[in-house]
Amino acid sequence: MSAHLGTTWLGLDLANPLVASSSPMTGEIDRLRALEEAGVAAVVLPSLFEEQIEHEALEMQRLVEYGAGSFAEALEGYFPEMDRYVTTSERYLELVAAATRALSIPVVASLNGTTRGGWVKYARKLQDAGADAIELNVFLIPTDAYATCEETERRYLDLVAAVAEDVTIPVNVKLGPFFSNLTHTARELVEAGAAGLSLFNRFFQPDIDLEELKVVPNLTLSNPGEVRLPLRWVALLCGKVRGSLAVTSGVWSAEDVLKSLLVGADVAMMASALLRHGPGYATTVLRGVSEWLDEHEYESVSQLRGSMCFGSAPNPEAFIRANYMEMLVTYTAPSGT
C-alpha cells in the first residue's frame, strides 16, 4: 500500500507536498493545467509588482490631465477613451480568475513590493478574484547606511500586517536570508499575520556589460546546491514558529522534496527544474517521493515531516557550528591538486 502524500500548507489541504513556485510557467493557463495534470498540488502565479501598479496610476493621471490648460472646447478631444486601456493589474486579476476556474488545486496569487502604500489594496482584489492565498514576495535590499536593522525589519512587519489585515485568505511571506536574527524575524512575521514562510527568495543579481558599460539584468536558474541553505533554516525554525514552512530555491529532485519534509517543511516549492524539464517532470518527482516512502516503510508524509529538524535530529548541532568544523577538518583535496 502506497504512503499517503497529503499535507497541509497555509491551512490548505494538498494532495502532496509539491508546489509550483512563481515563474513564467505559472503565468499561462495551458501550462497551469499541465502542471495540475502532472500532479502538482498547488501553484503560485507570477508576481504583480508594486512598481507596475504605481506606474500605471501615474500614467492614468497623466492621461486624464493631458490638455488641461487648453481651450475648453478642445478638451473633449484630448481625453482618452478609458475603456480602451487594459492595465497590467487588470490582466493579472483576469489571470487569477481564469486560473481558479480552470484548476481544482489551490491557486496562490503573488504580490511583490517593499513599501506600505496604496498598492496593498490589491490583496483584497486578488482575494475577490478567487485566489486561495496570497504570497507576499518582499524584494527589499536596504541601501540606507543610517537605517538600523530594526527599522528595516519593521518595514517587513508593517507590510505583512497591512496585507493580512485586508484579507481573510492566508498570507505567505517569501523571505530572503539576509537578517541579523532570522529566527526572531520569522516569529515576528507570523505574529504580524503571516500564515506561513517560504525560505528563500532568490535575489537576482545584475551583471555589467563591459562593452556598453551599463548594468544589465542576468537571470539564471537555481542549482541543486542552493537547497542546502533553506534546508538548514527550515530545520532551525521548525517548532519555533507557528506558521507553515516551505523550502524554495534549489529544489530539483524527489530527494530534495524528501529532505525538505524531513527538516520540517510542509511543502517543497519548485520552479527552475520545471522550467528546465517541463511540467511533466513533476510526475517523475512525485513518483520518486512515493517510492522512497514505501521503500522506507513510511505510511504518510506527516509521519516523516520534521523528524530531522533541529529539535528532533540525533545530532542537532550539525545544523550549526559542529558540522562546519567537521567539514573543515575532514576535507581532503582531490588527487593531483
Image (cartoon, helix red, strand yellow):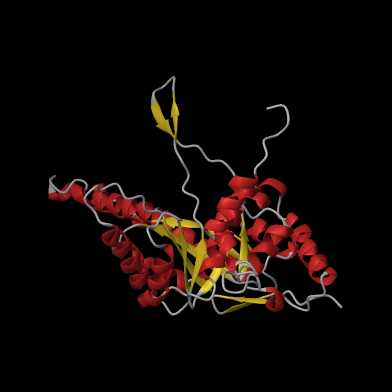
Q: Nearer the viewer, residue 172 or 243?
A: 243
Residue 138 lies, in percent from the top left, at: 41, 58
Residue 125 occupies quadrant = bottom left
Residue at 46% x, 73% y: name it.
Answer: 127
Answer above or below: position of 100 versus 337: below
| x 42%, y 74%: residue | 190
Residue 215's place in the image compared with 296, above or below, is above
For the N terminus, the image quarter is bottom right
Q: Image point 82% across, 70% down: which residue?
A: 296
* Residue 257, x across and y down, in percent: 68, 62
Q: Is residue 79 above or below residue 41?
A: above
User: Residue placed farthest to the front in the image?
Assistant: 329
- In this picture, residue 139 sits left or right of residue 41: left
Q: Mark yes or no: residue 222 visible.
A: no
Q: Nearer the viewer, residue 181 or 34?
A: 181
Task: Residue 221: name its quadrant.
Answer: top right
